[in-house]
Image (cartoon, coloured by chain):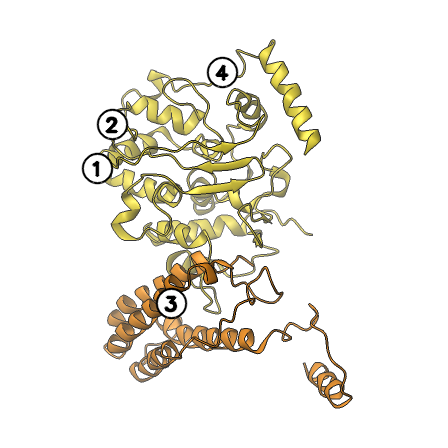
Chain colours: A orange, B yellow
Amino acid sequence: MKTRSTFAAIAAIAGIAITTTATFAQDVPAAVGARQGQFKIMALNVGVLGNMARGNTEYDAGQASAAAANLVALSMLDQSFHWPEGTDNMSIDGTRALPAIWENLPEFVMKWEAFGAAATGLAAEAGNGLDALRAAIGPVGGTCGACHDAYRAPQ
Amino acid sequence: MRRIIISLAAIGGIALGGGWLATAPGSVSQGALAGLSGDPLAGEAVFWAAGCASCHAASGAQGDARLVLAGGQRFASDFGTFVAPNISMHPEQGIGGWTERQFITALQHGASPDGQHYYPAFPYTAYRLAEPQDLVDLWAFWQTLPAADLPSQPHDLGFPFSIRRAVGVWNILNLQDDFTITGDLTETQARGRYLAEALAHCAECHTPRDALGGLDRTRWMAGAPNPSGSGTIPALTPDKLTWSEAEIAAYLNDGFTPDFDSAGGSMVSVIANLAMLPETDRLALAAYLKALPPVGD
């Protein structure tokens, strides 16, 4: 990683344009990197909650509430700039976003909003004990799955 | 492709000659079901384990809509596009008029009540290994399902795949009455094998296929190209799927990978099915996957 970023820095200083290759997975358009980043933040926070729900970690009301609040905050990020045309997996490498997203944008946006609604429901319950958390995390997982079912390619 | 067509035409020719009888669909004998009576509650568990709703309910259906087996989902393949038929309890458009024996003949022999072959997009190759009691229970549960009046649509297949009788040849090559994974298994692993190989038909997507669309059993669960588009279906063998048994079982319940990415594609619906089963069944599936022989590269 270190070598890679050093190389990138040197290349930038030398003014060499780095063409997009599969070797540099981070060389995706900024919008793609940004949306992948938001999903990574999402996964980290879902993980805090999911590990409690699975019994892998001890339930902590404060941490559960904080993680759920992060999910709500994420859901409020306006998505206008994260999904430019031509950033589907048929057009570029480094993404699993299916062209169907752009063919059904209103439905895609509805699925994002459904995530927000489920996250808000989870935030209301996450601090109220493990059973409440378990009941409210299911619908969030359901919205992840519903979108990935329709709009993300397998690996 | 050309070679496939020629060889299919050749076996089609054989079928027309001496093989006509050999390619006739089989059926369940009345005796095989004698003395069995169906329990709809047990049949519901079979229903979810067997994944009926994933193909026969509407695409993206959730909750009770997954019990409406109106068909209509389309499945692209190298041979054309298959369209899931209406298998709801509707007496004309669905299978509400069938007998229990006709139902189980369809599931285990891939044959319709009027003696036509079904195409193996319908995994009768797996259901063939199911216990008759489970299928009798399943039929009892079926009686509680709603009727839907959406007419079934024809498959969109090119010649020679449009010749149903040729499926009889395919069946001779591909139908088997034994599990693929054999040898000493624990009770839990054996339960997992039954669930995976006889009911949930995991191999239909996770095992690569030969030129005629038969499963390559020497590369069982080794992963395969995604038939309906880009990407690959991942391998499930223990050299590739390195999650713990607890992580696999949890994924099959809540849909999250160990690093809390979420399941996508067809697996979303599969997990919706498997989440309806007892935890012991998901752990059994995980134990079975860990017992698979590694496939290497």
Q: Establish if A63 lies above or below B27.
A: below
Identity, as a three-letter code, of the amino acid under mark 4: Ala
- Mark 1 or mark 4: name the one nearer the start of the chain: 4
Q: Would residue B212 be found to the left or right of residue B30 on screen?
A: right
Q: Which mark, by number, is residue B144?
A: 1
> In the image, are marks 4 and 2 on the same chain?
yes
Q: Could you tell me how far apart the alpha carbons at marks 1 and 4 are, in whole angstroms?
A: 32 Å
Say which residue appears at 24% left-offset and 40% top-offset.
B41
Q: Nearer the viewer, residue B210 or A50?
A: B210
Q: Are marks 3 and 4 in contact (CB under 8 Å)?
A: no
Q: Which residue matches tag 3?
A: A109
Q: Establish if B96 lies above or below B30.
A: below
- Mark 1 or mark 2: name the one nearer the start of the chain: 2
Residue B27: give x, y in percent of width and height: 41, 19
Q: Which residue matches tag 4?
A: B24
Q: Establish if B137 lies above or below B276.
A: above
Task: Name the outermost residue toward the top.
Answer: B18
Task: Label 4, secondary structure: give it.
Answer: loop
Q: Could you tell me how far apart the alpha carbons at marks 3 and 2 are, in whole angstroms?
A: 39 Å
Quadrant for residue B187, please give it. Answer: top left
Q: Which mark, by number, is residue A94?
A: none
Q: Would residue B137 be found to the left or right of residue B231 on screen?
A: left
Identity, as a three-letter code, of the amino acid under mark 2: Pro
Q: Chain of mark 2?
A: B
Task: Name the outermost residue toward the bottom.
Answer: A13
Q: Which mark, by number, is residue B91?
A: 2
Q: Is residue B191 visible?
A: yes
Identity, as a three-letter code, of the amino acid under mark 1: Thr
Identity, as a three-letter code, of the amino acid under mark 3: Val
> In the image, are marks 1 and 2 on the same chain?
yes
